[in-house]
Image: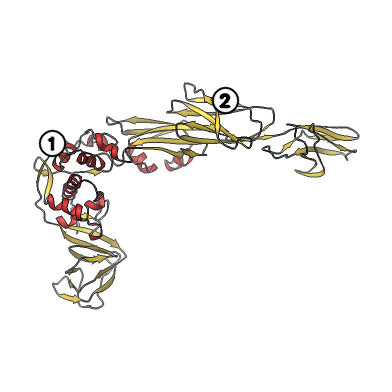
Amino acid sequence: MTTSPARTVLVLDGHGWGHGLGMSQWGAYGYAKHGWTYDRILAHYYTGTTLGQAKVATVRVQLVSATKTTLSSAVPWTVTDATGRHATLDPGALVLKGTPALAAQPALQPPFTFTAAQPLSVDGTPYRGKLVVSGDGKLVQVIDSVGLEQYVKGVVPAEMPSNWAPEALKAQAVAARSYALANLAKGRAFDLYGDSRSQVYGGVKVESPSSSAAVDATKGQVVLYNGKIADTLFFSTSGGRTASALEATGIAVPYLVPVSDPYDTLSPYHDWGPVVLDAAKVAKTLKLSAPIADVQATPGPSGRIKTVTVVSSNDSQVTLTGNQVRTALDLRSTWFTPALLQLLPAAKTMTYGGAISLTGLAHGVDALSLESKSAALPDWTPAGDLMLGPDGSFATIVRPQVTTQYRLVWGTVRAGLAKIAVAPRVDASTSASAVTGSIRPVLAGSTVELQQQSGTAWTTVASTVTDASGAWSFAGAEPAGSYRVRCAPGQGLAAGVSATLLVQ
């Protein structure tokens, strides 16, 4: 069950996790579990491709671009400077800043290249290869010049669980190798970022025997299309079918087309939701000038949302792409279905014995009901189905006997919270010798206060309690002025007051 007390909520149910292009990792795992080999898996997700050998042996990965970083080695290490001079350093750590300098070797000039017989650590994380350090006076940059296969060994277990089926790990190894080489940076001192801007590179600490074995088994293999390395995009979960590049980006890529993904059901993210969001916060996030009145989604061929039009209560509207909505609302994918639920009023006080109308709207739902909770019935209980009009609006009359909360029910969603406070009906009249009256419901022993108005304030001048019939009285003549009678009996009832009494 997913709940929100917000009076208007946006509810989203969806499928999959990620951009939907290329290889679904959970789908690949499912295919591997069903006996598919890695080359067959890759051919399925990257239509019309073949396998070939990479011609690149080394990549440069940016690990750090920060004001300060710490390099360390557990064994003696060597540093070589810009002129080719080198020196041997004792095991230990070096703290480097925007203009890197070596206190132990002041004659050496950056950029520095560090090597050792064992992996060197950058801010506590060990990496294979050579570390090249430079700076621009503000930021220090650390680049790992590492063998392609060593790099992929630090990527695969960071992108896919190492305990997955070997053929899935092999498919991931080839996809990661291909993706890296298809997306080498141009005009920079490095080829790849060490994070999700390229793909996550965790270094030595994430390496595992099973994933390293998958890398070794596919050594140098890449995905090719017409002789060129394919941009082998991959993601977590498709939801049952991948998307096309044309649909997602507006640019057709012949090997990134929709394919079925029947075994993606293994993923816990095959279906997700409901996600319930406060519509007021969504309006603020989307920079709308008024509350949300409707949400209209236009799906693409794969079912993923192409555009979303959000209509405001002042009839203004904004149209966003599915990717813009996904990013703004932090959704798992663009394959989602929106619904809008509203319940009004959020809070109101009524007099015992009366009735009140609850109104609202429901867009994108098939059936809606109401449930209630009060002091008399402390658990949420069904309070009736709601009839939706053609425009999605509804109205229903409720007659609570005590203060009661109401909320909307749609599937596992509980949304909108209307708190209807019920005050006792206080009837009062005045005569020359007394102020008398009664309360309803009948509650014996309830405190009743006689209050006199002084400016804008009311001051209690006398009090009594109700008898067994709910009646009460204040004997004696009151000084001239404006009076009222107030009763706050508790027992699920709010404070109630009588009409104002004028004493001449």
Mark 1 residue element: loop
In this rendered view, identify the residue nearer to me: 191 or 418: 418
Residue 277, position in %: x, y?
A: 45, 39
Is residue 390 depicted above or below 122 in this figure?
above
Q: What residue is drawn where x is 35% and y is 43%?
A: 327
Is residue 295 depicted above or below 158 in this figure?
above
Residue furthest to the top in view is 390
Q: Is residue 206 visible from the viewing direction of this image? A: yes
- As drawn, is 122 to the left or to the right of 477? left
Residue type beneath disc 2: Thr
In this rendered view, identify the residue nearer to me: 318 or 394: 394
Q: CA distance from mark 2 to mark 1?
A: 59 Å
Is residue 243 depicted above or below 195 in this figure?
above
Q: Residues within 10 Å of mark 1 (few under 14, many from 20)?
A: some
Residue 457, position in %: x, y?
A: 76, 44
Residue type beneath disc 1: Gly
In this rendered view, identify the residue nearer to me: 446 or 194: 446
- As drawn, is 183 to the left or to the right of 291? left
Mark 2 highlights which residue?
A: 396
The quadrant of the rendering that contains the C terminus is top right
Residue 328 figure quarter: top left
Circle nearer the N terminus (2, 1): 1
Residue 348, position in %: x, y?
A: 62, 35
Q: Residues within 10 Å of mark 2 (few under 14, many from 20)?
A: some
Mark 1 highlights which residue?
A: 48
Residue 81 figure quarter: bottom left
